[in-house]
Amino acid sequence: MILLIHIVVALASMLVAAMVFIAPAARMLVVSYVLIAATLTSGIYLIAANPAHMMQACIVGVLYLTVVSGLTVVARRRLAAGAEE
């Protein structure tokens, strides 16, 4: 069950990160942060519960975290630049 929740939250996180990248909004940034944290937390739990597939999970997790965090950081910078104008 936790695996299904983890997958749904990760997919939602990617969708929100893409949305906030396209149209930056402060509220959506907060949602993106929460979803990233929830995905990371559930991923750590899954690795702790089943360490046999840890290497593969870590590689995919790092890739996910890099892409979603990158989109969110760029969106935050764009939002900050728009607020200064």
Image (cartoon, grey):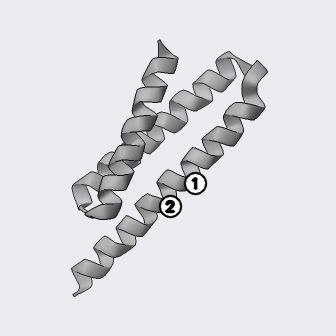
Quarter of the figure with the C terminus: bottom left
- Give me the residue at 77% from left, 19% from top: 52
Amino acid type assigned to the residue bearing label 1 in the image: Thr
Left or right: residue 61 compared with residue 28: right
Left or right: residue 68 compared with residue 61: left
Question: Which of the 4 quarters of the picture holds residue 22?
Answer: bottom left
Residue 56 lies, in percent from the top left, at 73, 33
Residue 13 lies, in percent from the top left, at 40, 42
Give the SS element for disc 1: helix
- Badge 1 local density, few (<14 within 10 Å), some, or many (20+)? few
Disc 1: which residue: 66
User: In the rendered image of this protein, does residue 39 appear above or below residue 52?
Assistant: below
Determine which of the numbered discs, if any, sits on residue 70 in the image: 2
In this orientation, which residue lies closer to the viewer: 28 or 11? 11
- Give me the residue at 29% from left, 71% from top: 79
Left or right: residue 48 compared with residue 79: right
User: In the rendered image of this protein, does residue 73 appear above or below residue 6?
Assistant: below
Label pair 2/1, CB-CB below 8 angstroms? yes
Q: Find the residue positioned furthest to the bottom.
A: 85
- Give me the residue at 42% from left, 68% from top: 74
